Image: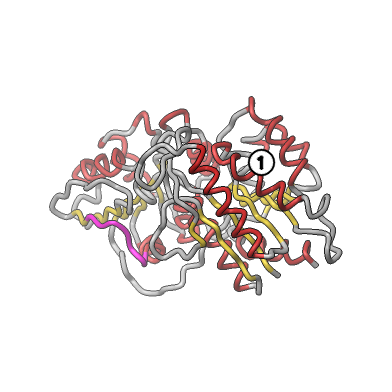
């Protein structure tokens, strides 16, 4: 069975990282997967690369040279996407986030969906009835009540199923999408998507681990963490700063190691004394799977609410400690780190982390 999976990351790399985890799980389950990415290339993730586009404000799209895209660029990119879709001859089309987000990409996604749906009407498992069309979303959307009716209309027109990669005990979909009840019968929770910890050893033991995903929005957190170190009980321990592939250079001090990234990040999470990070989906799920004591500083610039909601819901369950971005300072961060240090580690299996495997199971059931 063949799957065509569309994903577009604009600022950070979280969307692509989650899609890549899902693609690996699908391949392990016997699917042939084309992962089509429209964002900047990320080393180590194999994709069918579309002409890359990014956006610092989620409004204006910039090409690979940092210039605003025009209609000719959009036409070229749409043609490349449709060509890749046709050549894939896929049994299922998975579109990440749209129509619940990524309105910036509707210039190419509406033609893609129309192309998929003209083969037939709503999905039928009978041979020759066209592809299954699925929307894949994270646990929490960026709330936008004014756009909900538009999203629902497009979902009902083009999509057969909705996969929510979360645990409804933690974050029911209606927490960030008020009209979730109108999706009854088509909405399926998978659990959270995270790679399993493959390595073993004591790497990172006794360290404080500070990270911010790809690093595009984490500069303030990294500087605050470096300044917080002498104020904590862990001032004599090594602190490892993972600045991310997109970060500007961070200042270093004695006892602080600054690196871009680590291939053994998950293992170091499992062994660290305390993890300090933003509250992006992938980092938080890796942190919880590792059972690490964690301090989250959710990204909240530009009215972004997704990370704030996620951090609050997890804090309510006693799984993390939170410092709001508008309260971030060396002293407040140091106090939260000290609180996390003396708290128990998160309980194993506190939330469902089997989303990658469950996604493959659901697709296989539907395509049968």
Of helix, strand and loop, which mostly describes the magenta segment? Answer: loop
Classify 167 as above or below 23: above
Is disc 1 surrounded by few (<14), some (14 to 19) or many (20+) residues within 10 Å? Answer: many
Residue 337 visible from this viewpoint: yes
Residue 293: x and y, percent?
41, 53
What quarter of the picture does the N terminus occupy? bottom right
Residue at horizontal 20 percent and vertical 50 percent from the top: 235
Name the colouring of the figure.
secondary structure
Q: Which residue is mark 1?
A: 173
- Magenta stretch in the rendered image: 258-264
Residue 250 appears left or right of 89? left
Residue 300 appears left or right of 236? right
Image label count:
1
Quarter of the image holding residue 107? top right
Residue at the extreme front of the image, as rendered:
72
Residue 264 appears left or right of 367? left
What quarter of the picture does the C terminus occupy? bottom right
Residue at the extreme left of the image, as rendered:
254
Residue 282: x and y, percent?
48, 53
Residue 59: x and y, percent?
48, 33
Residue at horizontal 68 percent and vertical 67 percent from the top: 2
Classify 213 as above or below 201: above
In this rendered view, identify the residue nearer to me: 350 or 62: 62
Residue 135: x and y, percent?
67, 49
Residue at horizontal 50 percent and vertical 55 percent from the top: 50
Q: Is residue 133 magenta?
A: no
Q: Secondary structure at mark 1?
A: helix
């Amino acid at each position: 069975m063949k799957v065509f999976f569309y994903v577009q990351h604009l600022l950070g790399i979280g969307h692509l990282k989650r899609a890549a985890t899902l693609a690996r799980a699908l391949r392990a389950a016997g699917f042939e997967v084309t992962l089509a990415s429209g964002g900047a290339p990320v080393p180590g993730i194999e994709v069918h690369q579309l002409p890359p586009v990014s956006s610092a404000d989620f409004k204006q799209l910039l090409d690979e040279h940092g210039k605003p895209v025009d209609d000719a660029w959009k036409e070229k990119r749409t043609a490349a996407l449709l060509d890749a879709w046709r050549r894939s001859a896929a049994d299922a089309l998975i579109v990440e986030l749209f129509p619940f987000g990524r309105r910036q990409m509707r210039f190419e996604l509406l033609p893609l969906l129309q192309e998929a749906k003209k083969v037939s009407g709503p999905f039928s498992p009978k041979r020759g009835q066209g592809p299954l069309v699925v929307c894949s979303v994270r646990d929490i959307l960026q709330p936008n009540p004014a756009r909900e009716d538009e999203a629902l209309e497009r979902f009902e027109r083009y999509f057969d199923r909705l996969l929510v990669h979360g645990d409804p005990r933690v974050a029911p979909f209606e927490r960030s999408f008020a009209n979730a009840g109108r999706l009854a019968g088509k909405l399926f929770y998978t659990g959270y998507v995270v790679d399993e910890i493959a390595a073993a050893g004591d790497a990172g033991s006794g360290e404080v681990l500070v990270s911010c995903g790809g690093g595009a929005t984490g500069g303030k957190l990294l500087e605050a963490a470096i300044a917080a170190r002498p104020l904590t009980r862990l001032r004599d321990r090594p602190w490892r700063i993972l600045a991310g592939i997109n970060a500007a250079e961070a200042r270093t001090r004695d006892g602080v190691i600054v690196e871009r990234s680590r291939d053994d990040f998950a293992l170091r999470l499992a062994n660290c004394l305390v993890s300090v990070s933003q509250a992006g989906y992938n980092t938080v799920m890796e942190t919880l799977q590792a059972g690490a004591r964690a301090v989250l500083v959710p990204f909240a610039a530009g009215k972004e609410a997704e990370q704030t909601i996620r951090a609050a819901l997890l804090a309510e369950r006693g799984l993390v400690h939170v410092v709001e971005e508008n309260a971030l300072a060396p002293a407040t961060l140091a106090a939260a780190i000290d609180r996390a240090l003396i708290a128990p580690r998160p309980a194993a299996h506190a939330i469902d982390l089997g989303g990658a495997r469950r996604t493959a199971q659901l697709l296989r059931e539907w395509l049968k």
